[in-house]
Image: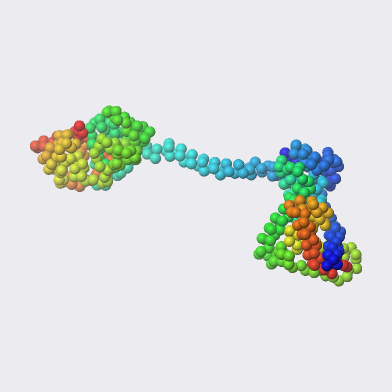
């Protein structure tokens, strides 16, 4: 046992001596210069390579993109110029839709003042408050402040109907519908009518409706709305504000202004 | 803090560098205060031992020089974090050893797809090709060959044996210092060195006696 230990120590010393006799190598002559150059290079990179810089860059770039995008959306006005009709080409009766471009006062405030009826069939954009209601907040004659478009209105707890932009569902009874026939439009006004090629004959007028308040009577033949002829083939699409109805009563053609009061 | 190479000692002698007679800790404290000449003196003192240690560890001179430079670069950028609680030589040898072990791991990964790297494992039973034992006429040639054989044998040792035996038998560090560099107990360190010698003895069987 003892001899084994001595043997191991002797062999270990032998190996140790062999390792100790190995030739020593030295660093090359340009060692310090290389160290210097590496240090200088990394010192230059230390700013741009710092974790904080990279982390900041990681968030700064997306933030800048979002800012630019947000600014574009804020000031671009959705690509619609003020005073321009935004939507809805007429399907069957261009005159029935295009009439809105000729209506000077299409903002909700003036519409209420004029006791007009607003029907759902598209989007009108004659005035700034219509297209950007959230920023303009027009005030009606009765002091009511419009909060904006249908989205704003729908989000309020006391409004469940979704109306077009600029239309206050509290003051208009027109339901949000898509394409409407003349009979449907008249029905919204409170008129039960049957339309033929020459016009629509009112078979009944609902009591306390816009039509009755405006003076439309049973037996009237409605020939035009705001001067645009209506008949069995008329289809309305888009948001349209009606001001008056042309009717034939007792053989006479009269214009009845629509009255919500 | 930029390093001025003109203040680095030429050839490691530190002739023109201030603080030549200073201790390592004094030089480090000066370097921490921005004294580039002090760091240059540190480089001059340790560049050869570190290069030699890494050369014996990797058995590749070019790689050893690169890692030695990297060692000093890391020391430079970690000057503010260095504490003089233990010897600077321990600190810099530990950095060099860690770099060398990392390099071995890289080599191992690279050798996975390399037929030539199949036998460069860290296994104790890694294959070692015995040298040609035919007698050579020139003694210097014999010595050179013996050095190469021993170097190759060292390179087949696992890092946990390679590091302490190089530090102890090649670099001449004390057992205590080797233990501190490797963060091991003194007994464990001695045991590993002994085991490393035994492994080398087996690999060089019949060769050391010549």
Rendered-image quadrant of the N terminus of chain B: top right
Quadrant housing residue A157: top left
Report the number of discs. 0
Quadrant housing residue A82: top left
Q: Give me the residue at 72% from left, 56% from top.
A: B101
From the top left corner, tell me how far across and down residue B80 is, in percent.
71, 40
* Vertical placement of residue A27 versus A211, above or below: below
From the top left corner, tell me how far across and down residue A152 is, in percent.
34, 38
From the top left corner, tell me how far across and down residue A3 is, in percent.
86, 67
Q: Is residue B132 left or right of residue A157?
A: right
Q: Residue furthest bottom?
A: B134
Q: Give me the residue at 49% from left, 39% from top.
A: A67
> Which residue is at the front of the view, A165 or B52?
B52
Q: Is residue A51 left or right of residue A19?
A: left
> Which residue is at the front of the view, A167 or A82?
A167
Rendered-image quadrant of the C terminus of chain B: bottom right
Q: Give me the residue at 83% from left, 38% from top.
A: B18
Q: Give me the residue at 37% from left, 39% from top.
A: A80
């Amino acid at each position: 046992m003892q001899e084994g230990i001595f043997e191991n120590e002797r062999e270990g010393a032998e190996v140790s001596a062999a390792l100790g006799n190995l030739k020593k190598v030295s660093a090359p002559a340009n060692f310090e210069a290389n160290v210097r150059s590496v240090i200088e290079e990394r010192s230059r990179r230390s700013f741009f390579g710092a974790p904080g810089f990279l982390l900041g860059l990681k968030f700064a770039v997306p933030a800048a993109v979002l800012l630019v995008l947000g600014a574009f959306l804020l000031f671009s006005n959705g690509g619609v110029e003020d005073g321009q009709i935004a939507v809805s080409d007429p399907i069957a009766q261009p005159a029935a839709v295009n009439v809105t471009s000729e209506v000077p006062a299409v903002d909700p405030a003036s519409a209420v003042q004029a006791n007009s009826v607003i029907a759902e069939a598209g989007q009108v954009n004659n005035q700034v408050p219509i297209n950007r209601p959230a920023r303009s907040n027009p005030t009606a004659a009765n002091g009511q402040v419009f909060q904006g478009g249908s989205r704003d209105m729908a989000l309020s707890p006391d409004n469940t109907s979704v109306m077009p932009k600029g239309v206050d569902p509290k003051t208009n009874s027109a339901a949000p519908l898509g394409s409407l026939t003349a009979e449907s439009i008249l029905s919204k006004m409170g008129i039960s009518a049957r339309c033929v090629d020459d016009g629509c004959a009112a078979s009944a007028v609902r009591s306390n409706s816009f039509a009755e308040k405006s003076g439309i009577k049973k037996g009237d033949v409605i020939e035009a709305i705001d001067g645009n002829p209506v008949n069995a083939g008329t289809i309305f699409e888009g948001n349209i504000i009606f001001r008056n109805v042309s009717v034939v009563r007792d053989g006479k053609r009269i214009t009845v202004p629509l009255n919500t009061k | 803090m930029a390093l001025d190479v003109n203040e680095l000692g030429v050839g490691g002698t530190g002739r023109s560098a201030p603080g030549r007679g200073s201790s390592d800790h004094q030089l480090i404290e000066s370097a921490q205060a921005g004294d580039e000449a002090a760091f240059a003196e540190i480089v001059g003192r340790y560049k050869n031992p570190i290069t030699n240690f890494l050369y014996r560890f990797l058995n590749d001179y070019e790689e050893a020089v690169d890692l030695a430079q990297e060692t000093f670069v890391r020391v430079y950028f970690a000057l503010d974090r260095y504490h003089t609680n233990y010897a600077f030589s321990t600190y810099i040898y530990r950095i060099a050893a860690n770099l060398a072990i990392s390099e071995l791991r890289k080599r191992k990964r690279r050798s996975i797809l390399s037929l030539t790297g199949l036998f460069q494992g860290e296994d104790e039973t890694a294959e070692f090709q015995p040298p040609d034992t035919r007698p050579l006429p020139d003694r210097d040639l014999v010595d050179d060959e013996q050095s190469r054989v021993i170097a190759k044998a060292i390179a087949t040792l696992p890092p946990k044996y390679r590091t302490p035996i190089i530090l102890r038998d090649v670099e001449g560090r004390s057992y205590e210092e080797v233990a501190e560099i490797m963060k091991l107990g003194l007994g464990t360190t001695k045991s590993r060195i002994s085991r490393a010698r035994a492994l080398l003895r087996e690999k060089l069987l019949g060769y050391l006696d010549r």
